[in-house]
Amino acid sequence: MAWLSKRLGGDVRAPKLDALGMALVGGRLLPRDPGPVAQFMYQNAQGRRVTLYVRTEGPDHRETAFRFAQQSNVRVFYWIDRNFGYALSSADMEREELLNLANVVYRQLNP
């Protein structure tokens, strides 16, 4: 986490979703213009996956509001909070289940 935090310029954490049956299976740094993105992938016992992307945003974002998007069968909840933007996506989960996970992720990242 320290390595990812240094690359993104802020405190990056991988939420713990074990209580919801989702285990962290990996994380990595991805290229993006103008800066890198952290990616965390989670999977449950049935093989259903969810991915969390974290990217640096400008310092002027103070209002947090979940937004929803869907393309084909991929559903995404995304939001900007302080200096980071987040996107939680899955092709395996329905909207309500993904929203529940997004709320858990948000609460863990903003205690």
Image (cartoon, rainbow, N blue to C red):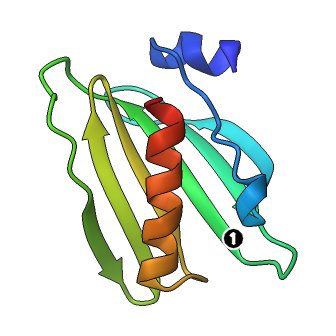
Secondary structure found at label 1: strand
Q: Position of residue 19 (x, y in %)?
A: 75, 57
Q: Residue at x 65, y 36 (%)?
A: 14
Q: Amino acid at mark 1?
A: Arg
Q: Residues within 10 Å of mark 1 (few under 14, many from 20)?
A: some
Could you tell me if residue 37 is visible in this image? no
Q: Residue at x 20, y 51 (%)?
A: 65
In depth, the one of 35 and 100 nearer the eye is 100
Q: Residue at x 54, y 51 (%)?
A: 52
Look at the image and tell me in which quarter the N terminus lies.
Answer: top right
Left or right of 32? Residue 79 is left
Q: Position of residue 101 (x, y in %)?
A: 53, 62
Q: Residue at x 33, y 80 (%)?
A: 70
In the rendered image, the vertical position of residue 21 relative to residue 32, given as above or below: below
Could you tell me if residue 14 is visible in this image? yes
In depth, the one of 38 and 15 nearer the eye is 15
Q: Which residue is mark 1?
A: 49
